[in-house]
Amino acid sequence: MSEFKSISELKKLLAADCKIEKVEPPVYASDIETTIVRVTVRCPDGKVYTIKAYKEESYALREFIRSNRWSN
């Protein structure tokens, strides 16, 4: 199975030394009825990116952030 697009995008930005600025809803909030996740990422050059994920992809994206929280 291929990786979700949102996770690939986030990995690419984190590899470019960008930092996660905000996750909505917060990563440690309840997963009940979480169907949309927005991640705001800021890069060293000042650019800000927003990654959106829906349904199953939103759960996978939150899990990816949770499991890699201390690596950024």
Image (cartoon, rainbow, N blue to C red):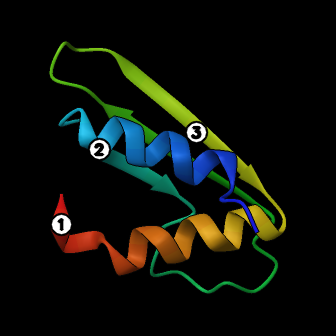
Q: Quadrant of residue 1?
A: bottom right
Q: Nearer the viewer, residue 65 or 15?
A: 15
Residue on which the image places disc 1:
71
Helix, strand or loop under label 2? helix
Q: Residues within 10 Å of mark 3 (few under 14, many from 20)?
A: some
- Label 2: which residue? 14
Asked whether the residues under the numbered discs 1 and 2 touch, taking CB atoms below 8 Å apart as contact, a structural biologist would say yes
Residue located at (35% from left, 36% from top): 13
Looking at the rendered structure, the secondary structure element under dot 3 is strand
In the image, what residue occupies the spot 67% across and 84% down? Answer: 31
**Whole-percent x and y of residue 37?**
65, 56
Seen at 52% across and 77% down, the residue is 63
Q: Where, by quadrant of the figure, is residue 28 drawn?
A: bottom left
Q: Is residue 31 above or below residue 6?
A: below
Outermost residue to the front? 1
Looking at the image, residue 55 lies above or below residue 39: below
Mark drawn on residue 51: 3
* Left or right for 56, reference 11: right
Amino acid type at mark 3:
Ile
The type of residue carrying mark 1 is Ser
**Residues at discs 2 and 3 in contact (Cβ within 8 Å):** no
- Between the residue at mark 1 and the residue at mark 2, the CA separation in whole angstroms equals 9 Å
